[in-house]
Amino acid sequence: MKRILLLVAVAVPVLAAAVYSRQQPAVTATTGLASELKIATAEKNPWTGLKLNNDKDQFQFVVVSDRTGGHRAKIFSRAVHQINLLQPEFVLSVGDLIEGYTQKPDVMDAQWKEFEGYLKNFQMPFFYVPGNHDLTNKEQVEYWGGRYGRSYYHFVYRDVLFLAVNSEDGAASTVSAEQTAYFKKALEENPNVRWTLVFLHKPLWAMPDLEKNGWADMEGVLAGRKYTVFCGHVHRYQKFVRNGMNYYQLATTGGGSRLRGVEYGEFDQVAWITMRPDGPLIANIMLEGVYPENLQIPDTDEKAVERRNKPEQTQAFRGRVTLDGMPAAGATVRFYRVEADAPNRPRYVADGLTQEDGTFQLSTHKAFDGIPAGEYRVTVVQTGKYATNQTRDANKLPEKYSEARTTPLRVTVKTGDNVVNLDLTK
């Protein structure tokens, strides 16, 4: 009997301790960077996991696109404050930082000082990449050299190789053999980096002669490694895939744009890049969606570029495209004017993208503002999305409508309201 009472006396406090321990949360020890997280856990917990998304090899930076090329007031200068809200580790550009196109040292000096005045507000480093507006002529090239030194360079950060390429090296739209040799050496000196990121102004791969402009050689030295390319220049967002690698053409960060939205790839943005162990993750952030806690973006004195010529007055225009009587959705419609002194070189004036019902609106100077009165040739190409000269997607419409010089479509735009049906046939 005594033995039984002794067992009971021992069992009761043990059971009590077990019950108490089930009522009390335990502290889970985690490893690596996650050890910074201190939290009490229980049998059931109101979270999905404790492995934090904070890999030591992961980092974030921002890429800004064209500021100039008909720049608009207060976009880039305010974007600096908006980028500060995102707190990237650094910022890279893809060129066209000033309006340029001048041989006057005092004008260059004023433009670069204005730009640098905005950069002073950055809370992180900014890396320059030149564009055609920055290196228009030999005078601007010499000015750049005197102010910033090299027009192309590279650096390594957290086992990622960054290449800042000059697409105006010696001639417009060119990467010189000397520059390619420089990057070949940089690549050879960094054979085992986990990724290579390339930044340049122009999408040289979308131009006619890649052997002549030097891009074929650049892709040759990049072959065999994982890389991603970023550019600007066209003021329109577009993604390319070449050699199994992603190439991103960014929209604008203040440069001239009709701002027709995502459908057209026309918007003010920054590219937020998260460099993960398995490659870069790109988030396109629209500037119109970045606000501080007080919803007030600091005002600036950045002025828009002045137009040299008054734009032509446009006329209201609505159109519809059908193929054998059925609506042609996702078709790009372009209007070309034939000048008397250049009958074989029709001049592009306006375009639009058809909706599900085949209807479209034209844009000349700004979003959906119509088109000037006159006689036009019209091309129609259907790829399912907005198509540019760079687009390589298959055209679903008869080819006879795709060339400005040979298209049978003619439209007369009159003063006032215009409604036009374009009835195509197979």
Image: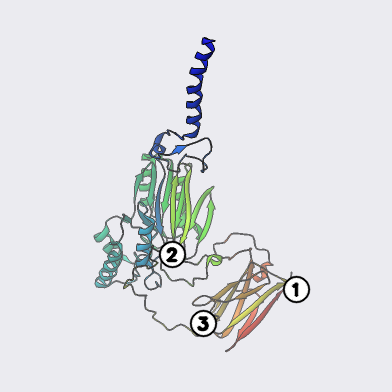
Q: How many residues crowd around disc 1 within 10 Å: few (fewer than 14), some, or many (20 or more)?
A: few
- Image location of residue 256, percent across then percent down: 43, 71
Question: Which mark is first along the chain, 3 or 1?
Answer: 1
Q: Position of residue 124 (x, y in %)?
A: 31, 55
Q: Residue at x 49, y 18 (%)?
A: 9
The kind of residue tagged 3 is Asp
Q: What is the total number of numbered labels drawn onto the structure image?
A: 3
Above or below — where is 168 with respect to 36? below
Labels 2 and 1: the sequence-earlier one = 2
Q: Earlier in the sequence, mark 3 or mark 2?
A: 2
Q: Secondary structure at mark 1?
A: loop
Q: Nearer the viewer, mark 1 or mark 3?
A: 1
**Closer to the camera in the image, 278 or 107:** 278
Q: Which residue is mark 2?
A: 287
Q: Position of residue 242 (x, y in %)?
A: 53, 51
Q: Residue at x 54, y 47 (%)?
A: 244
Instruction: Say which amino acid is labelled 1.
Output: Gly
Q: Amino acid at mark 2?
A: Leu
Identify the image quadrant of residue 401. Answer: bottom right
Tell me the quadrant of the picture where the N terminus can be found. Answer: top right
Mark 1 vs mark 3, CA separation in Å: 37 Å
With 245 as the anchor, is 423 left or right in this view? right
Name the foreground residue: 125 vs 137.
Answer: 125
What quarter of the picture does the C terminus occupy?
bottom right
- Report how far apart the C-alphas of labels 3 and 2 lie in the structure: 43 Å
- Callout 3: SS: loop
For disc 3, the marked residue is: 341
Towards the viewer: 135 or 266: 266
Camera sees residue 105? yes
Label 1 belongs to which residue?
325
Q: Are marks 3 and 2 in contact (CB under 8 Å)?
A: no
Neighbours of disc 2 within 10 Å: few (<14), some (14-19), many (20+)? some
